[in-house]
Structures are given as C-alpha cells and as structure tokens.
Image: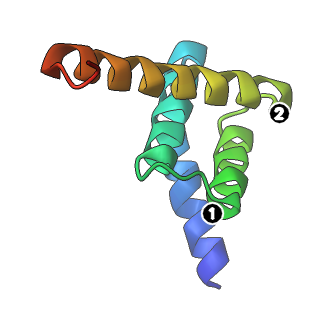
Amino acid sequence: IFEEAEQRELSQICDIFDSEPGKRYALAKAIELGRIDGAYLEEEWVDIRRIARQLDISEPDVPDLEDWVAEGRAWKKRGHQLISGEEH
C-alpha cells in the first residue's frame, strides 16, 4: 500500500512538468540532490530511473543527464577552490 501511495504522489509531482525542458531540468535537479552528499547510491540510481520513467524521459538519456550534473558539480567545486585560494 505504501508503494502505491508513493507512486501516486510521484505521478502528481511529475504531472506539474508539461514541457520536455522542464522535465529534464526537474530530473537533473533530482540527480543533483542524489549526489549532494558526494555519493550516488544504488537506491538513488534506481529512484532516478523511476522518476525518469514517470516523466517520460527515455532510459538512454538519463546517463547523459547524470554526466552533465557530475560535470557541473566538479566545475562548481573547482570554482570554489579558485575563488577561495585553496588550490595553491
């Protein structure tokens, strides 16, 4: 029963996004949240794919978004190092 309720909630949230760019942005933000602690656990990986299916984002597109998020996080980290002077 809990899974059914959870699925309905996910469906209602995903229904908010009606454009392809909006759906992809929402998924990218979900990926970012999954990586926020520096780890990307299998459970998070599975949940991201579940969200992608609900948003009608094809499975082959998900790794590209995951890579883009990882690149963005690395870019931000390097920027913080450069600005704070921690790199030298």
**Element carrying mark 2:** helix
Q: Position of residue 31 (x, y in %)?
A: 54, 39
Q: Position of residue 42 (x, y in %)?
A: 70, 60
Classed neighbour count for the residue bearing mark 1: other residues with Cα under 10 Å, few (<14), some (14–19), many (≥20): some
Residue type highlighted by circle 2: Glu
**Quarter of the figure that contains the N terminus:** bottom right
Residue tagged 1: 7
User: Looking at the image, which residue is at 62% across and 63% down?
Assistant: 7
User: Looking at the image, which residue is at 65% across and 25% down?
Assistant: 67
Residue 25, above or below 50: above
Q: Is residue 18 visible?
A: no
Q: CA distance from mark 1 to mark 2?
A: 19 Å
Locate residue 52 relative to residue 20 in the image: left or right: right
User: Looking at the image, which residue is at 60% across and 16% down?
Assistant: 20
Q: Which mark is residue 59?
A: 2
Residue ranking furthest to the right: 60
